Amino acid sequence: MIIVTGATGQLGRQIVERLLTRVPADRVGVSVRDPQKAQMFADRGVRVRPGSFTDATGLAHAFEGASQVLIVSVDKMGEECVRQHRTAIEAAVTAGARRILYTSQMGASATSHFQACRDHAATEEALRACGVPFTSLRNGFYATSAVHFLGNAAESGRFALPADGPVAWTAHADLADATAAILADEGRFDGPTPPLTGGQALTFDDIAALATELRGRTVTRTTDPDDQFREQMVGQGVPTEVADQLLGIFAASRAGEFATVDPTLAALLGREPITLGTVLREQLSEG
C-alpha cells in the first residue's frame, strides 16, 4: 500500500493520477483533510481516509498498512511547518512504513536565504533521524510561481520585481510523473535525490522576453529595491513576515541556490521536461 498525503492539492492530486497508471488502485491510499474532495479517487478504488498533520492519531489510521508513505510538504513556513512534517514522519514510522518519501526542494539547506528551503532541510534532518529508509525529492522551483510573479504583466505590458538570479523552473506535471515513477520503483533513490529540474535556468529578464514573444507585444521587467518591494507588499495587505519570505526567494536566486540544471528529471521522464515557455503559454491562453 502506497499512501500519498495532500492528494487534493495541486501536486498531490497529479501524483496520484500518475501513480494510478503504474500500480493497481487497491495498492494506493490517500490521506486528506477533506475526504469528500477526494471522492474521484474513491470512485476509482483508491482508499481514502481523513488525515491531518496536526492530528497524530488520525494520521495513524490514514497510514495503516502502508509500505511507503509520501509526505507532500505543507503550504506553510517556519516552526509550524517543520512540526507538522515531524508529526507525519512519526506517524509513518508508527504505521510500519518501509520507506518514507518527502517533497523537498532544490536548494534545501539550513543556510538558505529562503525560509522554505531551511524548513525542508530541517525536515530532512528529521527523516535522517527517524530510523526508516527515506527518499527526499529535491524538486525544482515550481514554474507556476514564475507565472504568479508575472501577475497581469501580459495585459499591462510591465512588471516590477526585486533583483533575481537564474532559476530552474519546473512543471508540476513533470514532478508528479517523476514522483510516481520513484514510488513505483521502491528504493530507486535513497536519501536526497539530485535536483529534479527543468532543462533551463531562466531569470525574470528571460521570462519577460518569453512573455513578449508569446504575446506579440513588449512585456518590460523593471527592478525594485528589496525595501521598496517589501513596502509595496505590506501596503497591499501582505503581512510583513510573508513579504520577507517572498524576498527570500529573490535573495536565494541571486545567490545561485536555484540555478542548477540536472538531467535526473529528464531521465526519469524518458523525455525532455516541459519548458517554462509551455507553462506560460498555457496560462496565457487560459487567461
Image (cartoon, rainbow, N blue to C red):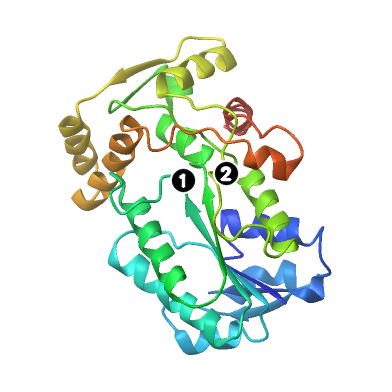
Is 109 located above or below residue 214 in the figure? below
SS class, disc 2: loop
Tag 2: residue type? Leu
In percent of width and height, residue 46 lies at: 75, 74
Is 213 located above or below residue 5 in the figure? above
Left or right: 109, with 240 as reference point:
right
- Can residue 263 be seen? yes
Is 65 located above or below residue 72 in the figure? below
Tag 1: residue type? Met
Which of 251/280 is in front?
251
Is 191 located above or below residue 221 in the figure? below
SS class, disc 1: loop
Q: What residue is rendered at 52% in x and 86% in y?
A: 58
Left or right: 253, with 227 as reference point:
right
Which of 96/189 is in front?
189
Q: Which mark is residue 44?
A: none
Q: Quadrant of residue 68?
A: bottom right
Q: What residue is rendered at 70% in x and 50% in y?
A: 177
Q: What residue is rendered at 61% in x and 26% in y?
A: 281
Q: Please tell me how crowded label 1 is: few (under 14), some (14-19), or many (20+) other residues with Cα within 10 Å.
A: many
Where the N terminus falls, by quadrant? bottom right
Q: Quadrant of residue 264?
A: top right
Which of 90/35 is in front?
90
Left or right: 67, with 71 as reference point:
right
Label 1 sits on residue: 106
In percent of width and height, residue 56 lies at: 46, 85
In percent of width and height, residue 7 lies at: 61, 65
In percent of width and height, residue 211 lies at: 52, 19
Q: Earlier in the sequence, mark 1 or mark 2?
A: 1
What is the CA distance from the residue labelled 1 to the residue labelled 2?
A: 7 Å
Label 2 sits on residue: 196
Q: Please tell me how crowded label 2 is: few (under 14), some (14-19), or many (20+) other residues with Cα within 10 Å.
A: many
